[in-house]
Image (tube, grey):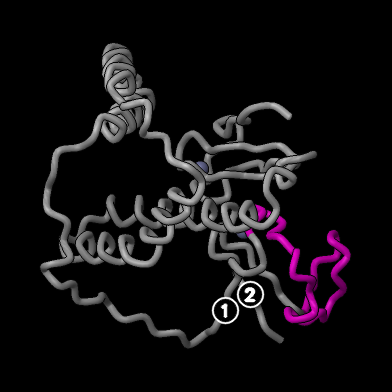
Amino acid sequence: MRKFKCSICGYTYDEDSGLLEKGIARGTRWEDIPQDFVCPMCGAPKTAFAELKETKTVPAHTILEDEHVESLRELTPGELSALCSNLAKGCEKQHLTEAIDSFYQLADYYKSKVPSHSSRNFEDIAEVLKYDLSERYLKANTVAAEKADRGALRALVWSEKVSNMANFLLERYAKEGNSMLENTKLYVCEICGFIYLGNDLPEICPVCKVPNFKISQIGRR
Ligand SMILES: [Zn+2]
Ligand SMILES: [Zn+2]
């Protein structure tokens, strides 16, 4: 029988074993699992799963056309703020006390320079995510592979999973609206940005594997 793997966290559904704790009997075929099935580990929808094929060959890398490389540009205040708060978190890991404060101060400074009209509506965010997922990750992965930048490649793997999860949730939001957020909690992993919608927070982040005390609850319902 076949196996289907979650593209976000790697959980694998095996038709042979079923998923007894969710009431799915052994031998249940993937097609026979309800459409509203979500990954028991990370909450990703059924569409996030792909069949595991043993003999899958992946091309070493895709050729990138030069014109597709985004030229270096000045970062916006919002991007600089995010960059500085990430650097502060990196310094926290290394216990660089003074640098932590300085980077947080810089992050706050740049945040104060973000124009107030720059908040995006839901459709704009969905559009940016779709563009990231359809083109930008491919380009970024290609550049990182050409430069043999293992750190960037690893960060991109996480980042793409997190974007995919955000995209799934936005697709659900488009259909369900605010009722999607009723009777459930919302969490964000402080390390990788993974969004978890549900009440039983996994013990570790399904994407970056940090313990769940690094996953913060957002808002209150
Ligand atoms: Zn999953
Ligand atoms: Zn994470």
Q: What type is the residue that disc 2 sits on?
A: Phe
Front position in the image: 44 or 61: 44
Residue 93, by quadrant, is top left
**Is 11 left or right of 98, judged from the image as shown?**
right
Front residue (pair 187, 203): 187
On screen, 8 above or below 66?
above
Would you name the residue on which mark 2 appears?
4
At label 1, counting other C-alpha atoms closer than 10 Å, the crowd grade (few under 14, some 14-19, many 20 or more) is: some
Dot 1 falls on a residue whose secondary structure is loop
In contact (CB < 8 Å): disc 2 and disc 1? yes
Q: Residue at x 46, y 37 (%)?
A: 191
Say if the magenta span includes residue 131: no
Q: Earlier in the sequence, mark 2 or mark 1?
A: 2
Mark 2 to mark 1: distance in Å? 5 Å
Q: Is residue 34 left or right of residue 98?
A: right
Name the quadrant of the C terminus. top right
Locate the N terminus and report the quarter of the image it occupies.
bottom right
Q: Residue furthest front?
A: 117
The quadrant in which residue 99 appears is top left
Q: Which mark is residue 52?
A: 1
Quarter location, residue 185 = top right
